[in-house]
Amino acid sequence: MPLRLRPNDPTFYDLFTESANHLVDGARILAELLGSATGTGLSASQQIAVQMKDAEHAADETTHAIIRRVNSTFVTPFDREDIYRLASDLDDVMDFMEEAVDTIHLFNLEKLPEEVAEQIEVLQRAAALTAESMPRLRTMKDLAEYWIEINRLENTGDAVHRRIVAKLFSGEYDTLTVLKLKTVVDLLEAAIDAFEHVANTVEQIAVKES
C-alpha cells in the first residue's frame, strides 16, 4: 500500500464543518419561513428572505475559502478533485434552499401545503447529520452511518415529494397556484437530493482513504 502524506493542518476539516453549519442555519431559516406561511400571512417573509440571502452569502465565502486553500496548499488531506466536489455539493444544498425561500417570497405565497413541513424536517435532520459528520473526515472513521442515514432521508424526501405533487394536482388548487407551489416543493426536493450527493462524495472519499 503506497505511503500517503496526510497533513496535520486541520483547516480543511474546519472549513467543511463550517460549511455544513451554514446548512444548519439555512434549514432553520426555512423552518422560520414555513411558520410565517401557514395561514398567518407573509409579513415576516421579506425579513426571512434577507436572512437566508445573508446565510447563502456566508456559505459562499466558506466555499471560496476552501477553494483558495486548495489552490495554495501543496499537500491536501485527500484528493483535490474530491475537495472541490465536496465543497460544490455543500454549496448546492444552500443554493437550493435559498432559492426556495426567495421563490416563496417573490410569489407571495401566503400558505404552503402542510406536507412541506415534512420536507423541511428532512432538510433539518440531514443538515444536522452533515454538520456532525464533517469533523470525522479527519479520521475517516464512523462515517458509514452518515451516508446510510442520508440515503434513508432522501428516500423519505422522495415519498413526501410525490405525495405533495399528487395533492397539488388533485384539483384543490387553481392552475397558477399549482405552478407556484410545485416550483417551491421541487426546489426543496432538489436540496434534499443535493444532501445525498454530499453523502455520496463523503463515501467515495472514505473508500479511497481506507
Image (cartoon, grey):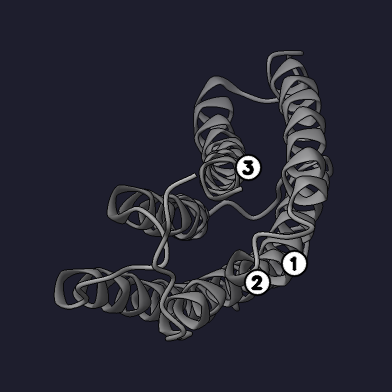
The residue pinned by badge 2 equals 24
State the residue at coordinates (82%, 35%).
Answer: 152
**Which of the labelled discs sits on residue 128, or is there none?**
1
Closest to the observer, 55 or 174: 55
Amino acid on which disc 1 is placed: Ala
Residue 78 as seen in the image, left or right of residue 185? left
Q: Nearer the viewer, mark 1 or mark 3?
A: 1
Image vertical order of residue 203 relative to residue 127, above or below: above
- Earlier in the chain: of badge 3 and badge 2, it is 2
The alpha-carbon separation of the residues under discs 3 and 2 comes to 13 Å
Q: Secondary structure at mark 1?
A: helix
Residue 121: % across, % down: 81, 54
The mark tally for this picture is 3
Amino acid type, callout 3: Ile
Q: Quadrant of residue 135?
A: bottom right
Provide the residue designation for mark 3: 192
Taking the image as drawn, is residue 29 in sight? no
CA distance separating discs 1 and 3: 13 Å
Q: Is residue 180 above or below residue 103?
A: above
Is residue 160 rendered to the left or right of residue 205? right
Looking at the rendered structure, the kind of residue marked 2 is Val
On screen, residue 141 versus residue 201, left or right, reads right
Marks 2 and 1 in Cβ contact (< 8 Å): yes
Specify which label sits upstream in the sequence, 1 or 3. Answer: 1
